[in-house]
Image (tube, rainbow, N blue to C red):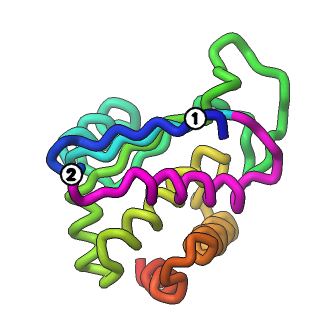
Amino acid sequence: MSKILIDIDSDFKKRVSKRSMKDCIISSVKCGALNNFDESVSLSITSNEKLKELNGSFLGKNETTDVLAFPFNSNWKEGKLTDKNFDNYQNLKHLGDIFISFPKIKDQAKTFKTGIQLELNIILAHGVLHLLGYDHKNKKMRQKMFIKTVEIIKHLKLDHIKAKLSLESR
């Protein structure tokens, strides 16, 4: 990866390790991408309000969510770069932007009994997979994304069993 840009709102800086987030992004790309590439990723860990605003502006949903991923390149499909013909609007050096609501992570960590660090890695891995063209529109696609997420958590040497159980209950 050429560059990983991480912005953490000041309210959450003491609770989030930039090193851990970088490791998760790198592992997610290693496990999720079937093509080699040299693109950057940006991550913003922010508030419920910011996620609600972005969700409303871009997806027309007036509600907060845990993660939003905005790919800069629509030519990724389940980890494969499908077309190398790009138009002027696609930035070949930037995979995309991920926004995570830290308050939502805290709530989900309690609900799913994962702890904040594991929950944050599960959700970040999910966001990176979206940038790589994975989705959960149907059962087959959901299963692929589920398996990849657990693989990423295992690669990070985190509690992949707890992550798997947690993901199965969602």
Q: Which mark is residue 12?
A: 2
Q: Residues within 10 Å of mark 1 (few under 14, many from 20)?
A: few
Residue 139 visible to an observer of this rendering: no
**Residue drawn 23% across the image and 78% down it:** 110
Q: Earlier in the sequence, mark 2 or mark 1?
A: 1
- Please name the residue shown 30% across and 57% down the image: 16
Could you say which is closer to the camera, residue 77 or residue 11? 11
Considering the numbered disc 1 on the image, is that residue within a helix, a strand or a loop? loop
- Judge by depth and name the residue closer to the eye, 134 or 14: 14
Q: What secondary structure characterizes most of the magenta part? A: helix
Q: Position of residue 112 (x, y in %)?
A: 32, 81
Whether residue 146 is visible, yes or no, is yes
Tell me if 169 is positioned left or right of 140 in this view. left
Residue 116 in the image: above or below residue 82: below
The kind of residue tagged 2 is Phe
| Displayed quadrant of residue 108 | bottom left
The verdict on residue 94 being magenta is no
Please give left or right for residue 61 compared with residue 98 in the image: left
Using the numbered discs, state the Cα–Cα distance from disc 2 to disc 1 in whole angstroms: 22 Å
Q: Residue at x 31, y 77 (%)?
A: 115
The residue pinned by badge 1 equals 3
Q: Which residues are magenta?
A: 14-38
Is residue 121 placed above or below 35 in the rendered structure? below
Q: Residue at x 29, y 43 (%)?
A: 8
Quarter of the image where the N terminus is located: top right
Residue furthest front in the image = 19
Residue 151 image-quadrant placement: bottom right
Q: Which mark is residue 88?
A: none
The image position of residue 135, as x and y in percent, is 60, 55
Percent across and percent down for residue 61 are 31, 43
Q: Amino acid at mark 1?
A: Lys
